[in-house]
Image (tube, rainbow, N blue to C red):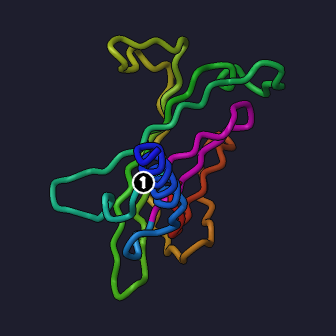
Amino acid sequence: MNRMTGITVLCMALMGCSSVTSENGTQYLKTEMQSSVSGPTTVTVTADSLLKKANTRHLILYALRPLPGKVFSSDLERKFAAATMYIDLSSDKGSWVAEINGEINYYDHERYVNGRLVGDSIKVIPVAPQTVPLALNKPVSISMPQGIHYSVMLTDSQP
């Protein structure tokens, strides 16, 4: 009986830990990308892990698979798209700024070898560098080519 009580207390303690919204003021960068024919791809990372450093590039990869039943306005929308976004954050006295650029690669086929996307892209579209100020819990939309929606938000809630 004593053992069962100990296990119950441990489980309750672990459940309480998972509901904490923020530890020691940790902030997160939540990003979401979606094309007109794909579902949303959301990625959340700690903001500190993206702080700007010399000779370092922070990248986030997004897979934009065309969904069945969608209406395609071009042959390019029928292709698998993989976006690579480079994000560097800088913080000064509580205000955050994000420097964002990248590229969108379109592939004839989505194919992986050892968990890595392989193949030749049929078209590469660069994403122009942009610098955007970030405010807590206020999403910012980034202008992207090919009608792709990209938003960035600084939050204190864990994913």
Is any atom of residue 99 visible in this view? yes
For image coordinates 81% across by 25% down, the residue present is 70
Residue sitting farthest toward the bottom: 93
Q: Position of residue 54 (x, y in %)?
A: 16, 61
For image coordinates 20% across by 62% down, the residue present is 53
Q: Is residue 11 magenta?
A: no
**Nearest to the observer: residue 74 or residue 148:** 148
Q: Is residue 38 magenta?
A: yes
For image coordinates 45% across by 53% down, the residue present is 14
Residue 38 picture quarter:
top right
Q: Report crowding for label 1: few under 14, some 14 to 19, many 20 or more residues within 10 A (C-alpha).
A: some
State left or right for residue 157 relative to residue 120: right
**Nearest to the observer: residue 68 or residue 45:** 45
Span of residues in magenta:
28-43
**Nearest to the observer: residue 65 or residue 119:** 65
Residue 141 picture quarter:
bottom right
State left or right for residue 145 relative to residue 72: left
Is any atom of residue 154 visible in this view? no
Q: Is residue 116 above or below residue 17?
A: above
Q: Position of residue 82 (x, y in %)?
A: 50, 30
Q: Position of residue 8 (x, y in %)?
A: 50, 49
Q: Identify residue type, mark 1.
A: Val
Magenta: main secondary structure: strand
Residue sitting farthest toward the front: 1
Q: Is residue 2 above or below residue 89?
A: above
Q: Which residue is mark 1?
A: 45
Q: Position of residue 148 (x, y in %)?
A: 65, 43
SS state under label 1: strand
Q: Is residue 48 above or below residue 8?
A: below
